Structures are given as C-alpha cells and as structure tokens.
Image (cartoon, helix red, strand yellow):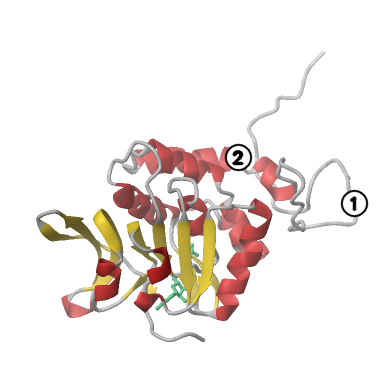
Amino acid sequence: MTQRPRFPARIDFSAGRPAPARPAEAGRSAPVPQRSQPQGVGMDSGAVRARMVAKLAAQGVRDAQVLSAMGNVERHRFVDTALANQAYEDTSLPIGLGQTISKPNVVARMIELLRNGAQGRIGRVLEIGTGCGYQAAVLSQVATEVYSIERLRGLHDKARENLRPLRLANVHLLFGDGMAGFAKGAPYAGIIAAAGGDALPQCWIDQLAPGGRLVAPMHQAAGTQALVVLDKTPQGIRQSVLEAVHFVPLKSGVV
Ligand code: SAH
C-alpha cells in the first residue's frame, strides 16, 4: 500500500480550501475571526513563508525575533488577491493609491536595525506610513506597542480591514500626517519610516526616548535615497547613512 507524500507543501492561492466548509466561498476568503486556524490560502502558505525566512537568513538577517515574526505574518493577506502568488517573493508590490509594500528583505532589515540586537521585545514603536498594514503586523510581534500613522485615508482604512481579523491588541492605527510624529504615544523606543523625505523631522527626534533609535529612508545628494539610522545617546545624537533604498516619498498633509 502506498501513501501519498504530504510534501512538497505547495501554496494554492487559487480557490479556497479542500474541505468545503463553506463551498460557495472562493478566492480570498472573508476573515473568520473566531477561528485560530488560518483558512483558505493561509493554510498552505506556511512552507512558502518558511522558505522566505530561510532566504532572509541567508541574506544576513540574524535577529531571531524578526525572522520568527516574518514567518508568522501572512503577507499574502495584505496584497491584492491577484498579487497573492508573488507575496513571498523578494519584491515590492503595489498596494493602491500609488504606494507600495516594501520587499520582505527591506522590512526585515529595517526592523532588525530598529531592534539593535535587543533580546526580548522593544518598547513602543512609531511607524510612519502604515500602507497596507503589513509592517505594522510584523512590528506587533517584536515591540510592546505599535503606533502606525498614515496620511491617505484609503490606505488607513485598508490597513484597518487587513489587520482586523488578526486582532492585534498592541497595534494602534492613526490617520494623520506622520511628519508631525505622534506626540501622544511618545517617547518611543523606536521610530521607523516607510517613506523618504529630504530630512528627518525634528519632532521625530524629539519624540524618541533616550537610548531610542530611528530608522528611515532619506534623500541624499544627487537624487539618491539611503537608509539612515539615528541613535539618541547620552552623548547626543549619532547618525549613520547605510545602503541605498527606494521608498515612496514622505509627503505632508492628509488626503
Ligand atoms: N509600511 C507600509 C509601507 C507603505 S508605503 C506597508 O507595510 O505596507 C509608505 C506609506 O507612507 C504610504 O502609504 C504613504 O501614503 C505613507 N506616507 C507618506 N508620507 C506620509 C506622512 N507624512 N505621514 C503618514 N504616512 C505617510
């Protein structure tokens, strides 16, 4: 007697689940918050995420908490159904209104920098640019509280919808201009920006706790953009410019 092998695990984004609990439902299933088991596309995606995590580790991401968070958060739930089969590739993807979700590699790298080798969770974090809410979900696993602010109402609403089924009690979504930071949640152990400006707003630095760290893309001379890491140390502000990146622009005002 032969048994069919249960592997290789494949990701099936096409049509819901094999056991027809609700057969009429197809494609991206509606959130079922009461269930702890992921349904539909989520059920087969663990192996694909494990491969993504192995690749991130091979690319140099060392922080075990970051790798574990990247393995836990179902990235395909944050992008359009038509793009779900690309969700675990190392690529940025459109999320609507001209904005993009960063490559997994960039998300992991920036959060690793933000954590700066911390053992457990870091404290309160402010994210500028919620977008689809993916990075906020990853941050929720490695920080005690996450405040995430978005200036586009459409994306703020989308993130709320994407995150609702995950019931992340430590994520606080805010609609507003992140150029002003979010003073009510300050001081922050970490501030992370998903959009790049010409300079780091002074209020971000002011809202950083002593010992806190800010990670943000920033325009450099000659139209390039690079990751900047700023530390608020007892000796003062220390800033370093790291690798080149390509983020959407940091804009002021809300729409
Ligand atoms: N972290 C997001 C990435 C979104 S892209 C994710 O995981 O999907 C960056 C986002 O920054 C865009 O949605 C853009 O609208 C937003 N943004 C740009 N300037 C902003 C500002 N001043 N305040 C808040 N959000 C801003």
Give the mark count.
Answer: 2
Amino acid type, residue under disc 2 in the picture: Gly
Above or below: residue 209 compared with residue 247: above
Q: Which comes before the other along the chain, label 2 or label 1? A: 1
Residue placed under numbered mark 1 in the picture: 23
Horizontal relation, residue 198 to residue 146: left or right: left
Residue 33 to residue 150: above or below: above
Furthest-top residue in view? 1
Label 1 neighbour load within 10 Å: few <14, some 14-19, many 20+:
few
Residue 255 is left or right of residue 163, and the answer is: left
Which quadrant contains ligand 1? Answer: bottom left
Look at the numbered disc 2 and give the secondary structure of its residue.
Answer: helix
* Residue at the spot 56% in from the left edge and 55% down from the top edge: 87
Q: Residue at x 71, y 41 (%)?
A: 36
Q: Which dot marks residue 250? A: none
For label 2, the crowd category at 10 Å Cα-Cα, with few meaning under 14, some 14 to 19 and many 20 or more, is some
Instruction: Answer whether labels 2 and 1 touch (C-beta < 8 Å).
Output: no
Q: Is residue 188 left or right of residue 22?
A: left
Residue occupying the point 34% across, 43% down: 59
Give 248 or 252, whichever is nearer the viewer.
252
The picture places residue 66, in percent across and down from the top left corner, at: 41, 43
Q: Is residue 1 left or right of residue 53?
A: right
Residue 186: percent from the left, percent from the top?
36, 63
Image coordinates of residue 79 in percent, x first then y, are 59, 63
Q: Secondary structure at mark 1?
A: loop
Q: Is the residue at mark 1 in contact range of ligand 1, meaning its CB lies under 8 Å from it?
A: no
| Residue identifier under label 2 | 46
Q: Is residue 84 visible?
A: no
Front-most of residues 77 and 203: 203
